[in-house]
Structure formats: C-alpha cells, structure tokens
Amino acid sequence: MSTLDHFWAVVPAGGAGTRLWPLSRKAAPKFLHDLTGRGRTLLQDTHDRLEPLVADRLLVVTGADHRDAVLEQLADIDPEQVLAEPSARDSMAAIGLAAALLERRDPDAVMGSFAADHVIADPGEFRRVVARAAETAAEGWLVTIGITPTHPATGFGYIARGDALGAPGVFEAAEFVEKPSAEVAREYVDRGYQWNAGMFVVRPGVLLDLLGEQDPAFASALRGIADDPQTLADVWPTLPRIALDHAVAEPAAAAGRVAVVPGDFGWDDVGDFDSLGTILDAGNATANRTGPVVLGDPGLVQVIDSDALVVPASGRVVAVIGLDDIVVVDTPDALLVTRRSRAQDVKQVVASLQQQGRDDLT
C-alpha cells in the first residue's frame, strides 16, 4: 500500500505497564521491550506497520525520561519528531499537543493516533482499515477504529455501532461504554459492539475544536504551546489530566459527530501476562501443543510436566515441575510467580511496593 497524502501518525508512548511487572518498569515500560519474540520492540513494531502509510510523517509523544531510549530504538527518525512531555498528563494532552503542532505545520493534515504498546497480527489489514478511516476523517469526522471482538472481554471498553454512513465499512459511533461485567460483555458482543482500542483518526483542527467545545482553556493552551514551544514547561503542568475518550470522544459521539470503522486484524494491548502468553502461543507453529511458553533464551528454562509461561530475564536457569497455569518472570532484582488466571492482580504488587517507598523496584 502506498503512503497516504498528508496523513500523519501520532504514537503516544507512555504508561508503566504495571501488570507486566517486573519485566515492565517506570524506567523501561513495556513499549521498549520485545514481547513477541521477533526481535523488535513493541515501539519498533508500531513504527514498522505505520511506515508504509506515512513514510517519515510520524510523531512520538513520550515522557522526558524515555526520549533517549525512543530515539535509540527509532534511530532513523528526526529527533524533532520525538516530543517529550515534562510529566504524564494522560492521552488528551499528549495527542492534543501533537494535533496543535500539526495544525500549524500542515493545514491539510489528517492524523491517526496509535499506541506504542499494542500487538497487531495482520499489519496489511490494519493499514487498509486505517486508510478507510483517514478518508472519512478528511470529511470532518472524528473516527475511531473499533476492534471486532473475539470474546466477551471485561478488560476493554466498547463502542456501540450505529447506522451506516454511506462509505463501505463506516458507521456512526452511537456510544462509548466503559469496561463491563462478564454478563454485560456477552450482551455487547451479541449486539455487535466493537472493542475500544483508543485508536482515533481526525483532522488536527477538528480534534482541537471538539476539545474547545468542552474545555476552551485546554484547547487554547495546547495551541498556545504550538505557537510558542518555549512555554511548554510552564503551561504543561496546568493542563487537565484526562483521557481523549472522556475529554472529546464521548461527548462528540453523543452529538453524532464520531464515526467508527470496524477492524479485524488481530489486536491485543498486551495488558498482562495471560495476554502475553496467548500472543506467544499464537506465534508458535506448534501452538496447540502442551508445554512451556518462553520469552527469552529457551536454554535457560527447564520444564517438566508444565505449561508454564517463563521469562528468564536474569540469566539464571529457571526450572518448573508439575505446575499448570503458572507464570514465572525472573529478573535480576525481582521474581514474580503467579497463575495466569491471576495475572491482572500483578498491579497490586506494584502498588504495594510504591506504598513502601520501593521506587527502585517499580
């Protein structure tokens, strides 16, 4: 697929990935790791699948502490394309800053926001869906890409799909709904709802105007930073800490101004070690076999009668005997042992360590 004229990719690269502790830390969050075993980090994979659409029209928005690591992993991009946030202010500020800069740089721009830490199995189909979304966004819509559910997940928000908008595969987004209970999730899937992956495609000026309808001062502040980047350090801490979904997408959907393009390209946000194990299994040619799943050097893993997920990141040999549904993550300064079915609870360990002042471990 050829590049799309005036299409820009914005890649928010933030978050600590606390459910993937101790592999993912504040100093080295999950987007900087190779979690697929293919030799590319999640950030590099994100760049690779977007490059055919945008060539060099890509902006990464990341924390100041991670800018050097991002530049090291994306050595071919201009350092000016990596925007450093002075502090974390959630997705509206990060994506809004990129929008304000692009509004000035390219009046004909359409931008797509795609997180740095997602895994996509079919990049070609992903690009076809993004191209369809970009065509719709050029007409003035805020477009979200809805993921076709594979099961009634309780860990994702959902998008209610409304009437078709004319172009094939494009629908009105009737409503964004929060993470549901298991019973409600089954109902959503039966009714044709899409998973909300936080992917938005829009003209920069449209995004900022929609924000301005809800919070004029916020939109004005972002445009002010773009006018004078020297004000970033002073203005940034005053910006609201809010997600784009809540700041813009939900009220815009209620007003009938959001479109959804369904996508079925094998998406996962690698939210925990259970999800990671599923991804690694799917990439294994013998995925139906029983036995260990290893991320790292298989020579460091000894498993007997177990289907464990093992991450031998310390250089030590890890042995597991007779245990199923087990995750073992061994790093130089921390060891995690849990069941895959309890993978979501790993974040509680991080919270406890933070309360104890053990910032060296988080």
Image (cartoon, rainbow, N blue to C red):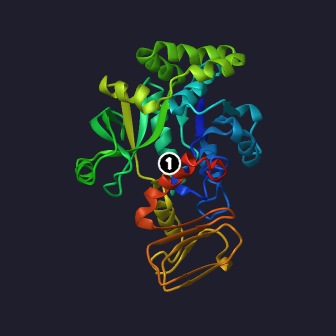
Q: Residue at x 69, y 64 (%)?
A: 332
Query: Is residue 176 rendered to the left or right of residue 330?
Result: left
Q: Quadrant of residue 342?
A: bottom left
Q: Residue at x 28, y 50 (%)?
A: 181
Residue for badge 1: 126
Under circle 1, the secondary element is: helix
The correct choice, above or below, for 301 with respect to 356 in the image is: below
The correct choice, above or below, for 257 with respect to 349 in the image is: above
Q: Nearer the viewer, residue 324 or 258?
A: 324
Residue type highlighted by circle 1 = Phe
Q: Nearer the viewer, residue 352 or 177?
A: 352
Q: Nearer the viewer, residue 47 or 36?
A: 36
Q: Where is residue 290? Give x, y as percent.
A: 46, 81
Q: Quadrant of residue 58?
A: top right
Whether residue 48 is visible here, answered yes or no, is no
Q: Residue at x 47, y 29 (%)?
A: 242
Whether residue 97 is visible here, answered yes or no, is yes
Q: Where is residue 215? Give x, y as percent.
A: 45, 16
The correct choice, above or below, for 225 with respect to 157 in the image is: above
Query: Is residue 50 rendered to the left or right of residue 243?
Result: right
Q: Where is residue 241? Give x, y as percent.
A: 50, 28
Query: Is residue 338 rendered to the left or right of residue 15?
Result: left
Q: Residue at x 55, y 27 (%)?
A: 93
